[in-house]
Image: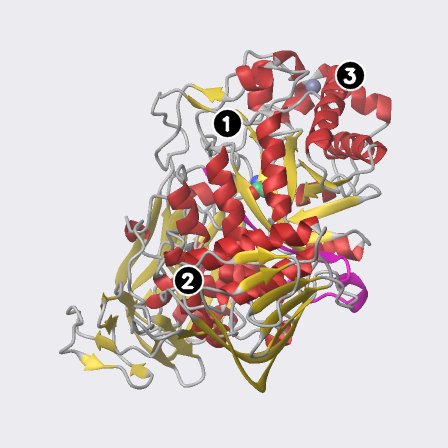
């Protein structure tokens, strides 16, 4: 466990000296023009001025005073009449076609922050606040400057699941403060799910009386076991309104999510008649995707949806209400006479695009959307809503990749990008699973978040439909605010540049030079944060043309890196890294950054060199587009060995299709062993191979089978790397044909995947 934030990054301020503001903050402003008009010195008698009678700017002034108190220790006075000198002047009325734009002008007498709106003014305040060195208390020197800035996207979101775990109101407010620091303006609040209904609904009191409590919680990776400890909590409508106000003061809109028609077990437990089977149900103690949904053939379901949404709309003034729509297995509906009668009544038929049940889901979602439209609100739904056909006014939140948003945009619908492999902050930030707080797995480092380009591959017209991007934090294995912060920070910093900056100005290396100052703010605010960014950056890079592998390493602040290639632990006496290391034999690279404040975590990665290394490979089957590289099949003989994280680019993934590869060793030579490294991650539908076939050939035309092996199906959840060794009598060959069979029908115990094609992940084919 590495929950505690370490102090790898030391402060820079000298005691007694006024610290100097640095405007190169995160996210980086559009324009920072240094002026020669001297500098403004913020001291104990600086005053903050806002226009009399302007309530939002008064609120901004109070927040600014709070930030400055925390950073400088000064209690600055708020005034409404602008002093001639030594004042921070807040104003709105900046002329801009971007309502969130702002400018900051600094000269020796004043700092003026002018927003195109109170929100714009607030982002100017955030920039000013972040420009201060959080390690220094006392006077701050602000060099004269003119800053002009505005966000790229109007929707800059963060999602927080308070169903799988309940977080008290104070924690939700702390979450809101944390996102405000990152110029985020939408808080997607996931309030209902199988594991707990968290919002008071007056007309259905049992939703919280019964549905907000469960008899235990799964605490293991199996998704199924339970600690049998009663767990629950909910937000009253007054508390929810208080949170809405708290967020609005920080120019953040709360978008509540009522997830339907699936993810409804908590509601069904309270009102079993709303389910297809009538129950009994119990609030889920486990994770995964439940097959029990709202019954779409029961008129009471539609009444329930309308009643709940009416109360939701009354609490939340947001233009958008999220109504879920994700992960809805259709087995109950297929077997339910009422649902089937509804399908007949509506004349829904299965066609090439959608099943009748998928269309029924669209019918339910459209019903909810119309109810919202009747109250002047719009809906957002997860990308599954595309499956049964998009209805007018549907906005799509794309999570299973970017394709949902692209498809929506192509159909002229608005969309929000939140693809798992860039935006799921419940995924781990390191491949060293044992070094991380226990979690759901996956791998989304800060650098990956930074790479998201929300409008890639879209025409200018389609790109206009991408409202923005959002990160999601699902809390199956996250139960404390400190752990929430650890998962969010500093990935939220990377996301904020995706949301705020134009793509041509984004630069990850430059971002990392600005990040330490923001991390100082985290520390000063008492936030827990992940420190991986201070570890060795970079890694092993295959050079497919030169048939080499290079270790290309760096530290974000230039601190020295020490490394070994012989397996020993690196320390100050080890070799100092100065340039990329060319690797040409089987070895493990171990490296560490050493600063005066201590050692970073260790980087370790291995390469293998064997008869197949760097040999060309041809594939007769196609890997999944997301789990292959531009170099293609060369990935299988590049010498790099993957970790247990499937999304690192080291693994090639096949969905329901075998891997069918032929390696050309370049010359005829004796071959007696083929080793296939297979990743197993059953939770993520990645199963072990079901068998292997190996054939050898001297001419690439005629292959002689030398081994056929069958494997049984997996019997339970497991994450591991299987090294399958297939041995046979030494035989002369130049071409080696390897077929690895994929699980085509996932086993029963994997409820989300069962019966569906599994994935086969292979990182390396090793020939000896
Ligand atoms: C989701 O992650 N089920 C939207
Ligand atoms: Zn039904």
Cα–Cα span, label 1 and label 2: 44 Å
- Classify residue 197 by image quadrant: top right
Specify whether residue 459 is painted magenta: yes
Dividing the image into four quarters, tell me where ligand 2 lies.
Answer: top right
Q: Position of residue 726 (x, y in %)?
A: 30, 57
N-terminal-most mark, 3 or 1: 1
Residue for badge 2: 72
Label 1 Cα neighbours within 10 Å, binned few <14 / some 14-19 / many ≥20: many
Q: Earlier in the sequence, mark 1 or mark 2?
A: 2
In the drawing, does residue 307 fall left or right of residue 760?
right
- In the rendered structure, the answer to whether residue 547 lies left or right of residue 559 reads right
- Residue 299, numbered label: 3
Task: Tell me which residue sits at (32%, 60%) in the image.
Answer: 675
Crowd rating for badge 2 (residues with CA inside 10 Å; few <14, some 14–19, many 20+): many
Q: Residue at position x 33%, y 79% from top?
A: 558
Q: Comparing marks 3 and 2, which lies closer to the viewer?
A: 2
């Amino acid at each position: 466990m590495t929950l505690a934030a370490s102090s790898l990054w030391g402060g820079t301020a000298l005691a007694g000296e006024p610290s100097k503001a640095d405007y190169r903050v995160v996210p980086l402003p559009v324009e920072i023009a240094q002026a020669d008009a001297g500098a403004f010195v913020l001291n104990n008698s600086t005053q903050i001025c806002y226009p009399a009678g302007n309530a939002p700017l008064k609120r901004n002034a109070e927040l600014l005073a709070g930030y400055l108190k925390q950073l400088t220790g000064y209690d600055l006075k708020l005034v409404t009449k602008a002093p001639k000198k030594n004042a921070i002047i807040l104003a709105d009325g900046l002329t801009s076609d971007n309502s969130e734009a702002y400018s900051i002008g600094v000269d020796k007498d004043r700092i003026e922050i002018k927003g195109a709106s109170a929100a714009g003014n607030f982002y100017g305040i955030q920039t000013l606040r972040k420009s201060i060195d959080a390690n220094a208390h006392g006077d701050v020197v602000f060099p004269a400057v003119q800053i002009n800035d505005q966000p790229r996207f109007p929707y800059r979101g963060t999602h927080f699941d308070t169903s799988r775990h309940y977080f008290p109101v104070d924690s939700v407010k702390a979450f809101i403060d944390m996102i405000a620091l990152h110029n985020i303006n939408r808080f997607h609040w996931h309030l209902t799910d199988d594991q707990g209904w968290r919002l008071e609904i007056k007309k259905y009191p049992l939703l919280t009386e019964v549905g907000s409590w469960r008899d235990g919680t799964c605490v293991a990776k199996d998704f199924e076991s339970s600690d049998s400890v009663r767990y629950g909590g909910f937000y009253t409508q007054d508390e929810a309104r208080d949170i809405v106000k708290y967020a609005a003061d920080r120019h953040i809109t709360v978008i509540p999510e009522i997830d339907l028609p699936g993810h409804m077990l908590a509601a069904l437990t309270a009102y079993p008649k709303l389910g297809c089977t009538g129950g009994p149900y119990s609030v889920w103690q486990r994770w995964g995707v439940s097959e029990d949904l709202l019954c779409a053939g029961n008129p009471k379901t539609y009444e329930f949806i309308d009643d709940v949404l009416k109360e939701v709309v009354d609490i939340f003034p947001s233009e958008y209400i999220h109504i879920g729509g994700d992960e809805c297995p259709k087995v109950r509906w297929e077997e339910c006479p009422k649902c089937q009668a509804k399908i007949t009544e509506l004349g829904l038929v299965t066609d090439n695009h959608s099943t009748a049940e998928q269309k029924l889901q669209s019918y339910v979602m459209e019903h909810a959307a119309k109810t919202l439209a009747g109250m002047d609100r719009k809906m957002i739904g997860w990308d599954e809503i595309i499956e049964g056909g998009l209805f007018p006014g549907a906005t799509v939140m794309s999570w299973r990749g970017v394709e949902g948003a692209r498809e929506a945009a192509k159909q002229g619908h608005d969309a929000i990008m939140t693809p798992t492999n860039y935006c799921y902050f419940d995924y781990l930030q390191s491949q060293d699973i044992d070094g991380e707080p226990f979690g759901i797995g996956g791998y989304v480092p800060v650098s990956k978040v930074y790479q998201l380009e929300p409008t890639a591959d879209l025409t200018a017209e389609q790109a206009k439909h991408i409202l923005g991007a959002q990160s999601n934090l699902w809390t199956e294995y996250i139960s404390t605010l400190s752990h929430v912060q650890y998962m969010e920070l500093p990935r939220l910093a990377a996301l904020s540049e995706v949301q705020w900056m134009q793509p041509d100005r984004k630069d990850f290396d430059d971002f990392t030079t600005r990040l330490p100052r923001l991390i100082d703010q985290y520390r000063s605010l008492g936030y827990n944060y992940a420190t991986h960014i201070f570890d060795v950056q970079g890694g092993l890079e295959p050079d497919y043309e030169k048939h080499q592998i290079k270790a290309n390493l760096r530290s974000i602040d230039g601190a020295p890196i020490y490394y070994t290639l012989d397996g020993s632990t690196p320390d100050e006496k080890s070799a100092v890294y100065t340039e990329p290391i060319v690797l040409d034999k089987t070895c493990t690279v171990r490296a560490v950054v050493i600063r005066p404040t201590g050692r970073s975590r260790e980087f370790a990665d291995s390469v293998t060199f064997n008869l197949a290394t760097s040999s060309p490979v041809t594939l007769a089957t196609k890997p999944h587009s997301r789990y292959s590289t531009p170099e293609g099949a060369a990935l299988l003989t590049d010498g790099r060995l993957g970790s247990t994280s499937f999304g690192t680019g080291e693994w090639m993934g096949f969905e329901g299709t075998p891997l069918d590869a032929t390696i050309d060793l370049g010359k005829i030579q004796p071959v007696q062993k083929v080793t296939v490294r297979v990743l197993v991650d059953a939770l993520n539908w990645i199963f072990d191979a079901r068998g292997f076939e190996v054939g050898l050939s001297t001419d690439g035309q005629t292959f002689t089978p030398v081994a056929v092996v069958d494997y049984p199906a997996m019997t339970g959840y497991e994450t591991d790397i299987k090294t399958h060794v297939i041995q046979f009598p030494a035989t002369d060959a130049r071409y080696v044909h390897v077929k690895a069979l994929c699980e085509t029908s996932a086993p029963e115990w994997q409820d989300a995947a069962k019966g569906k094609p599994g994935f086969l992940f292979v990182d390396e084919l090793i020939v000896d």
